Amino acid sequence: MPPLSAAIAVILGLQVVCTDLYARRVPNRALLAAAVAGSVAMLMLPGFSTDMPDAMAGLLLGLVLLLPFHLIGWMGAGDVKLFSVLGLLLGGDALVPLWIIASLLAGVHAAAGMAAKSGVTLGFISRSPPALRAYIFVNGIDLFNRMKASREGRKGIPYAAYLGIATLLIVFTGVSHG
């Protein structure tokens, strides 16, 4: 069973996957709640959570590693804050695997976007039955319009969502702990 702080990280990761994919947002309230819950768990149940020194090192390391990317405009502040909170919850050892997995996923996303812009398609939709194509078209436009409105002009790769997916992989596979 993962430590309590890892369970909090999983809950945060799941929420961020949804909010970042849909609205390109990382809710500050969720970050604060996870950081507070994780800190309380570390203080009240030290044997069932990340050690406080490792958590503080992870928090600071997460901030130091990604803040430069935000400062030059390559990454949103929410991505940096999430990475720091994940460092707090999972410890510094988890940050490199998180970073690698999320960056690989973001790279695939970027490559798919570039392929789509150059006219490459998956083709499965064009080979689908007409009724399914109509359903995808009508519902896809509605979902796309709602997502676009919720994003309020924010664009880019949902790096926080990929950090959330990486969190799930790391916690459930134990990658960072041995």
Image (cartoon, rainbow, N blue to C red):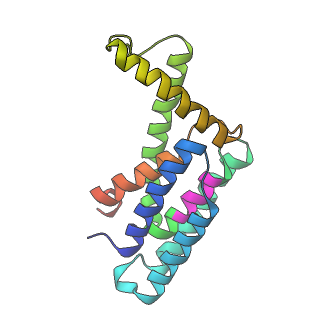
In percent of the image, x 49 and y 49: which residue is there?
A: 18
* Dominant secondary structure, magenta: helix
Q: Is residue 86 visible?
A: yes
In percent of the image, x 25 and y 70: which residue is there?
A: 1
1 over 48 or under it: above or below: above
In percent of the image, x 48 and y 56: which residue is there?
A: 15
- Asked if the magenta segment contains residue 82, the reply would be yes
Q: Which stretch did the figure color magenta?
A: 78-85
Q: State the count of labels.
A: 0
Q: Is residue 8 left or right of residue 27?
A: left
54 over 164 or under it: above or below: below
In percent of the image, x 34 and y 52: which residue is there?
A: 169
Quadrant location of the C terminus?
A: bottom left
Q: Is residue 97 visible?
A: no
Q: Residue furthest bottom?
A: 44
- Asked if the magenta segment contains residue 40, the reply would be no
Q: Position of residue 167 (x, y in %)?
A: 41, 55
Of residues 18 and 91, the one drawn nearer to the viewer in this rendering: 18
72 over 122 or under it: above or below: below
Q: Position of residue 112 (x, y in %)?
A: 48, 24
Q: Position of residue 64 (x, y in %)?
A: 63, 59
Q: Position of residue 139 (x, y in %)?
A: 48, 29
Q: Residue furthest left?
A: 1
Q: Is residue 150 left or right of residue 35?
A: right
Of residues 32 and 83, the one drawn nearer to the viewer in this rendering: 32
